[in-house]
Amino acid sequence: MVTRQAALLALVVAQTLAAARALAEPEADRADKPVLATPELHHAPVGMTEAHEDLSIDAEIIHPELVRRALVVYVTAQQPAPREVEFRRGATGYVATLPADQVRAPFLAYTIEIERVDGSRVPVFASRTRPHRVEVPEDLMDERERASLERLGGRRSVVSASGEYVSFGRSETNEIDPTTRRLRTVDDFYYRLEAAYTYRPLRLITEFSLRIGVVRGRSPVPFDLETDVFDPNERFRVGLNYGAPTVRVRLDDIVHLEGEFLTSVTEVGFSVGAGSALLIGDPYGSKLTLGFESIQVFGERFYSKLDIAATRALVLSPMIELTNMPHARKYGVRLLGEVGIDVGNGFSVALRGGYQARLSTSGGPSGGATLSYAF
């Protein structure tokens, strides 16, 4: 019994001496012993951000010497495949910036991972299976684009081909007929063939297009004694080869403005021109269009067009046009009507007809058609 008590007493004395030696050990000696450190990353989670703007994620890294890389791994609603952005040293810590073109409604989600110096990678915020979600509210322009595109059935591009024949009857020239002693009259007509391509961004610029075409016909061209030929079969012939890029800009939901630049080759040489149109109303429904177009030598035209959406597939369009095209001495008035029909699957047809004259005593009919395909 005495022996057992002596053993317990010896153990207590040994533990007491060990504790006393630890307390007496110099602080410098304790600091020399290795400490097992673990890298950490701290940041304030982002809950909401603006669409189409860079998203910066700030962080502080504890023991960066133990970290080879720190990364934001993110996905978007449009791109479910993970993408990575590395943290870079910033002014007060570390920052990772997600590009603006990836910040789109309705959301994105991210996790943060660190890659240690030994090559192992571990998540330090959220995880790939349960990433942190950031709400990205849809801005007004995005809402407009989405609504317009849904209405158009997702069809941003349109190709079209059109043709038109226009007769003004017989119009007066500025020459005196030696037989009748009156102003000579000539057949006044032309035909036009055109092809066009339109693309619809449906944002601030709602559309841009390119038209190319040809015009051929006869017209009461003003006579110039110094430069014109005397052969009546040649001098009254008119023609135009043209190209015209056009841009449509949204000023308001119901107000759009079109601008057009024309380059052309007429019967007398190279010419340039311009045009513009103001659209009031629904750009893809009922609206009023007021516009003008002018080409050097060839002439000008001023027009109004009222589109009436009778049904979803039928549009009726009365038109009034004042023009001295092509290369005429006097302005004429055109009264036209157009019927547009959506035949489905992106195809539509527009039929046009009317009457026009430069003189109250003479006039003629016109007719044309446009076939278009949207995709």
Image (cartoon, rainbow, N blue to C red):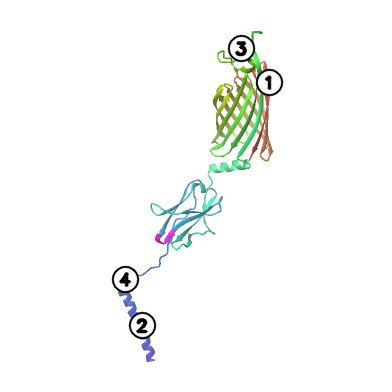
Residue nearest the viewer, comparing 169 with 11: 169
- Compare marks 2 and 1 and give the one earlier in the sequence: 2
The numbered mark at residue 29 is 4
Left or right side of 334 for 118: left
Instruction: Kindly report which numbered mark, 2 or 4, lies closer to the viewer in this rendering.
Output: 4
Disc 1 secondary structure class: strand
- Compare marks 2 and 4 and give the one earlier in the sequence: 2
Q: Are marks 1 and 3 in contact (CB under 8 Å)?
A: no
Query: Are there few (<14), some (14-19), or many (20+) residues within 10 Å of tag 1?
Result: some
Which region is colored magenta? 64-68
In percent of width and height, residue 302 lies at 58, 24
C-alpha separation, residue under disc 1 versus residue under disc 3: 22 Å
Q: Quadrant of residue 197?
A: top right
Disc 3 secondary structure class: strand
Which three-letter amino acid code belongs to the residue tagged 4?
Answer: Asp
In percent of width and height, residue 69 lies at 44, 58
Residue 282 visible here: no
The numbered mark at residue 12 is 2
Instruction: Kindly report which numbered mark, 3 or 2, lies closer to the viewer in this rendering.
Output: 3
- When the figure is inspected, residue 146 is found, relative to residue 351, above or below; the finding is below
Query: Are there few (<14), some (14-19), or many (20+) residues within 10 Å of tag 3?
Result: some
Instruction: Kindly report which numbered mark, 1 or 3, lies closer to the viewer in this rendering.
Output: 3
Residue nearest the viewer, comparing 209 with 93: 209
Q: Determine if the magenta segment contains residue 65.
A: yes
Which residue is depicted at the point 34% across and 80% down?
16
Q: Are marks 3 and 4 in contact (CB under 8 Å)?
A: no
